[in-house]
Amino acid sequence: QYIAHRHVLRTSQAYRNAVAEAVELQRALYIVTAADEVRSSDSSRHTDKVQTQALQISSLRKIKNMPGHIPMYEGMRLLLYSKDCVRLGLMNGCECILLQLIFADEESLPALSRSGEAIWLTHLPTDLLLRAVGARWVLPSTQIPRLPQGVDRRGVFLLRPSTDYLK
């Protein structure tokens, strides 16, 4: 119970910090919600009751920090929580700066928004354009086709959503 309560407090504080920073930087604040997708072979077993039980598990190790609401804004500092490319230093604990959210084509964004106002995304962004802090390597332009010309390319890479399985 303490772990779950602490996780809620930590998530709440992260949201408050993100709102304050987004207002200070005059940036839009996007809220991304982790998505649950069920394989067709498992769909008959994934009932509403099973999903509710999974969300009530209090051990963070079993649920991998679900449910997840992640506040993000351009310029936000993030830590990687995966091992994407050890050779380039893109692994657990690598500090990155969010340069741009690349939205899904189906996403409908408001025409106007105030800085710090929460914009709840319906779809996961297709990519996050990140810069690894302190990196000196440069990826070829074929790997980052959407990067505007004239932008410093050192340490810039695309991160795509990943999937994990809850047993």
Image (cartoon, rainbow, N blue to C red):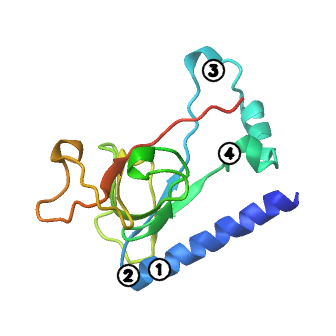
- Residue at mark 3: 43
- Residue at mark 4: 64
Amino acid of disc 2? Leu
Q: CA distance from mark 2 to mark 3?
A: 43 Å
Q: Residue furthest right?
A: 1
Amino acid of disc 4? Lys
Q: Position of residue 86 (x, y in %)?
A: 45, 45
Q: Residue furthest bottom?
A: 24
Q: CA distance from mark 4 to mark 3?
A: 21 Å
Q: Is residue 47 above or below residue 101?
A: above
Q: Residues within 10 Å of mark 4 (few under 14, many from 20)?
A: few
Query: Could you tell me if the residues under marks 2 and 1 are in contact, i.e. CB atoms within 8 Å?
Result: yes
Residue at image position (48%, 63%) is: 78
The secondary structure type at the circle numbered 1 is helix
Q: Position of residue 114 (x, y in %)?
A: 38, 77
- Residue at mark 1: 21
The C terminus lies in quadrant: top right
Q: Quadrant of residue 56?
A: top right
Q: CA distance from mark 4 to mark 1?
A: 26 Å
Q: CA distance from mark 2 to mark 1?
A: 6 Å
Direction from residue 89 to residue 49 in the image, left or right: right
- Residue at mark 2: 25
Q: Position of residue 105 (x, y in %)?
A: 29, 43
Query: Could you tell me if the residues under marks 4 and 3 are in contact, i.e. CB atoms within 8 Å?
Result: no
